[in-house]
Image (cartoon, rainbow, N blue to C red):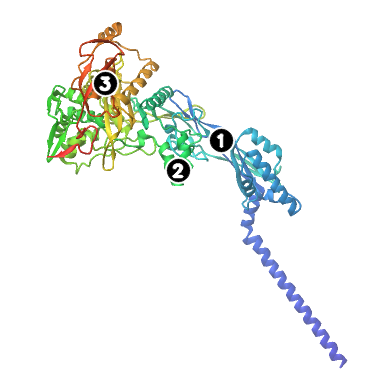
Amino acid sequence: MAVKKKYDASTKARKRLLVVFVIIMLAFVALAVRLGYHQIYMAEDYAQRATLQQTSDKVVSAVRGSILDRNGGELAISATTNTIWVRTDSVRGNGKTEQEKEENALLEAHSLADILDLDYEDVLETITSERKLLKVAKNVSAATADIIREGGFAGIEIVEDAKRYYPLGAFASQILGTTTDDNVGLTGIERYYDRYLSGINGRWITSKDGKSNSIVYGTDKYYAAEDGYSVELTIDSNIQYIVEQKIAACLEKTQADRVMCLMMDPKTGEILAMAQTEEYDPNDPRVPISEEDKQQFVFMSDAQKVEYWNRIWRAFCISDTYEPGSTFKLITTAIALDERVTTLDDTFYCNGTYQVADWLLKCWYYPRAHGKQTLVQAVGNSCNPVMIQLGQRLGLTRYYNGLDAFSLTERTGIDYPGEGTNILQSRSSAGPVGLATMAYGQGIAVTPVSLVTAISSLANEGRLMQPHFLKRVINSKGEVILDKQPVIKSISVSEQTAADMLYIMEETVDEGGGGTAKIRGYRIGGKTGTANKPEGGGYSKTDVYGSFIGVAPINDPKFVILVIVDTPRGVLYGSQTAAPCAREIMNEVFLYLDIQPDYTEEDLAAISKSKVDVPNLTGYTLEDSIGILAGRGLEYQIAPEGEYYENLIIIDQFPKPGEELSQGSIVTLYYEPGEEVLEQEHGHEDEEVMD
């Protein structure tokens, strides 16, 4: 029995050993599998994690190139600034106990919030986040960055950066545009030429220990950033300044909603100046531009805020369209002359209306009539029936071919984002009535830049140049990378036609309603326009675009200027709103460009005696009378006085025609109110009356 017990005990012992051995072997197998899993399967992942923990990889921002005017003046530059980053692992691990770590994090958040003037809760959430690397603040000054460095905060790293800065504030803001917080072009030139301005960011890779200190024996690689190129524009800051000052004065005088101006060199297509009175500061592009806007901004929805920003950031002269009024009659006349369906001496007769198919179209002068007149006089009179006849002589095909030649059926291709598209009547559906109304400038809308480009071709012997802002691109060494050359887009008209049109435009300023743009000693050509704004399917009787487009000097054109006054109060005419503003601008620009006056004998006589003969204004419109008086240096007043002056015909005046007055004297104009039918030039909804 004893032997059996001994056998049983031995067997059990061996079994237990076997079980233990099996367990140990299984443990070793599991450990080997686990070890293999971490060393082989997870090796790449762990290597990446180790690299992230032990390596600091910072972006070295490229310095964005400057934007310069044509004389090298700085319009947009990049100023050195600092960005504050945090490695959150270092913040959360700053202490021996959990309580100490929490207290240190709270203290660091308080200190950083005070130094950076940030919300404490936001800073705390950032520096204790589960994410590894986060931006705490950007555009931090050097002095503030030095305070943070001296504080020795856990996990905080400071990287030098660049901030976009506009040294002249709101100056030329719609031209320059803005950038995002990351220095990416958002609007304007900043966006269009972002590929040149932005440059290529670099990298700085260094090895770090657990406390984010550099490891001497670790990796340290620096890939330098490639700074952006500088962009030199065709804008002349001196002319731009003159324009901005004068349109601001015009806004105050006319009490308009806004005033816009565009100036271009007709021989090269270079934009010399572009401005509008709704200026914003690109250094703070989202700040409302007026106190009234600031009060309303608080109650705006996000969608309304975006709409507001888009409105003030938009360049009206490029992105928006407007009805040009009588200024478009220059285009119709030029096409007709070039196609030889009329001549300067051609005579026409206006009886106040003109029948086209089933429609009786009226002259804006109706119920009066211009009677017999030459082509030159008809343009000066803005006579609708004459424009209708020119359109009929041309026919749809030749008229639209002419619009093609003036580049009015397509975008100009200007180097600026968001160019608008002209709204013309369809070639296939215009018909005889559509052709007639378009011929005198009704029912169409054009971008200011397209109209300036078209008229500029008349000042350049018929060569239509592509408008552009870029003059050249320069690298950091001052080397020219790209030199923009003028581009001829088309030949709009012959040299002779262009010369004839300059003659017509000069006559309009010298003898007609464009006289408010006249400057003694300088030959100026131009045309005013007054177009009522569309409203509810018709046209407003009080809200208008008053405009003037001019060429100067006529004998050697240096610029074409367009001034648009949006919804002036009181006298609405372009001759009294836009033309005087253009005159003020041109006078200053002549002085700046050192263009000396060349006085005629008539000018010298008028200057020497400072007296002029009073013209006979009976039968003229108020708009033309104002221009004629201004051309002779005389002022005016209206009797009886009122608030709304539209379609007024002068029936008497004082002093009488032929009397001599000193320049600056006032002529009183007595008027006869016109009928409410009304001016086709002004676009009233009842202009077209079915016969």
- Foreground pick, 597 / 530: 530
What amino acid is labelled 3 in the image? Answer: Gly
What amino acid is labelled 1 in the image? Answer: Ala
Q: Residue furthest front?
A: 640
Residue 442 versus residue 93 in the image, above or below? above
Gap in angstroms between the C-alphas marked 3 and 2: 42 Å
The quarter of the picture where the N terminus appears is bottom right
Residue 320 versus residue 3 in the image, above or below? above
SS label for mark 1: strand
The x and y percentages for residue 632 are 27, 15
Residue holding disc 3: 627
- Mark 1 or 3: in front is 3
Q: Earlier in the sequence, mark 3 or mark 2?
A: 2
The x and y percentages for residue 354 are 13, 33
Tag 3 and tag 2, C-beta contact below 8 Å: no
| Residue 598 picture quarter | top left
- Name the residue at 80% across, 85% down: 11
The quarter of the picture where the C terminus appears is top left
Q: Is residue 19 left or right of residue 357?
A: right
Residue holding disc 2: 305
- Name the residue at 14% across, 30% down: 352
Q: Is residue 221 left or right of residue 323?
A: right
Q: Earlier in the sequence, mark 1 or mark 3?
A: 1
State the mark number for residue 590.
none
The x and y percentages for residue 151 are 71, 39
Residue holding disc 1: 162
Tag 1 and tag 2, C-beta contact below 8 Å: no
Q: Residue furthest bottom?
A: 1
Q: Earlier in the sequence, mark 1 or mark 2?
A: 1
The x and y percentages for residue 32 are 69, 66
What amino acid is labelled 2 in the image? Answer: Lys
